Image (spheres, coloured by chain):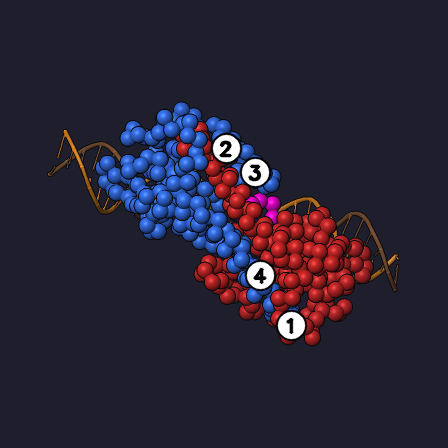
Chain colours: A red, B blue, C orange, D brown
Amino acid sequence: MSTSSRFAVAVHVLTLMAWADEEPLKSEHVAESVNTNPVVIRRMLCELAESKLVVSQTGSMGGSRLARQPEEITLLDIYQAVESRGVFSLHRHPPNPDCPVGVNIGTVLNDVLDEVDSAVESVLANITLREAVGRLKPCVRTVAAKSAGVAGVKNLSAGVGAKRKNGKEHTLAARN
Amino acid sequence: MSTSSRFAVAVHVLTLMAWADEEPLKSEHVAESVNTNPVVIRRMLCELAESKLVVSQTGSMGGSRLARQPEEITLLDIYQAVESRGVFSLHRHPPNPDCPVGVNIGTVLNDVLDEVDSAVESVLANITLREAVGRLKPCVRTVAAKSAGVAGVKNLSAGVGAKRKNGKEHTLAARN
DNA sequence: TCTTCTGTAACCAATATAGTTACAGTTGGA
DNA sequence: TCCAACTGTAACTATATTGGTTACAGAAGA
């Protein structure tokens, strides 16, 4: 349904910062971990800064870090910072107002979509960034990001390609 | 988040059929109510027929009607018939496997996205098409669709433009 | 002042959905 | 047996959103 990976990338970015503790991260290093362009990351960091989730510093030795402790940031905060719409959309063009169904279906659908959005939000509100970090495999903690950067980058192949339990696609094919 | 109105249109179409009772509806009449092209409707009807929600008849006097009673169709059935992906997507390109966060974030996100999808599905599973029809304003029932068609169509202006309670956009601007 | 960062504009590419035309095939009835 | 009215579907275009890229102004430390 969603063609956007904005939420996934935002969680990734903030998880990196929680992982790096107080150390400010450069957009270039974050982009290496996310496997995208630094400008894409900086654009997202601006949105996250507007929502008071990160603080950035310009200039030499600058970078971005969390504005609050990871346990004070929920996935709902992140979701609301980067996703401007609800889960579904209504009709692209308004239905026919001369039809008894068309004229009222919008009201019915709005109620349903509100229920859906509320359900999504309550799931996300119950997961903190700290918990998300805790779910990362602890075995790799020994190579945690230091001031030298997030990780040595040798190649960008393979990655997260698993399908989810319901069989719906959540990742696109690996880079060609 | 979603740029698709497929779910909204599908609910609209099936609500029309529930409203019309056993009377088969022509794609052209449905399209008039939805305010779109008959081919868009026929494409969607094919998907709904594959999911055994409607049955269609070709030829003269043909059309489509519900395959089951409205109380035996849930919004989850409709959602699964027309939406191929979950609510969110993961990264467009796989994250960096050499980064301790990048290599594991997909697993964490998959779990979260599964929780979100489950929440959405349980909301939709608890609303039947019959209930959706019941939520339509009963005051307009007197002009219910008859064999002559869904409604007389004079103009296609105005429509459902209200924003939802959380302020997120669910309709695009009115036709220009 | 030089270097290294962020912030941001401008543009292009990729993807998904919707809209449109056209036509083959099916069906009921004159 | 033909015709008119439907569905099913291919092919193409239009539109919108997101992501990727280059470029550069401005901030800040050395």
Nearest the viewer among D17 and B162 is B162
Which label sits in the foreground, 2 or 3?
A: 3
The stretch of residues the image draws in magenta is: A82-87
Residue A121 part of the magenta segment:
no
Question: Real-space Cα distance between discs 4 and 1?
Answer: 16 Å
Give the SS element for disc 1. helix
Nearest the viewer among D13 and B80 is B80
Residue for badge 3: B164
Question: Dot 4 falls on which chain?
Answer: B
**Taken as a whole, is the magenta stretch helix, strand or loop?**
loop
Residue A83: x percent and y percent?
Answer: 60, 48
Residue for badge 2: B160
Question: Dot 3 falls on which chain?
Answer: B
Q: Image point 71% across, 69% down: which residue? A: A145
Residue B110: x percent and y percent?
Answer: 54, 62
Q: Amino acid at mark 3?
A: Arg
Tell me the number on the disc at residue A171: none
Q: Amino acid at mark 2?
A: Val
Q: Residues within 10 Å of mark 2 (few under 14, many from 20)?
A: many
Which label sits in the foreground, 1 or 2?
A: 1
Residue C21: x percent and y percent?
Answer: 36, 38
Residue for badge 4: B109
In the image, residue D12 sits, relative to residue B175, either above or below, namely below
Question: Dot 1 falls on which chain?
Answer: A
Mark found first going from the N terminus, 4 or 2: 4
Residue for badge 1: A138
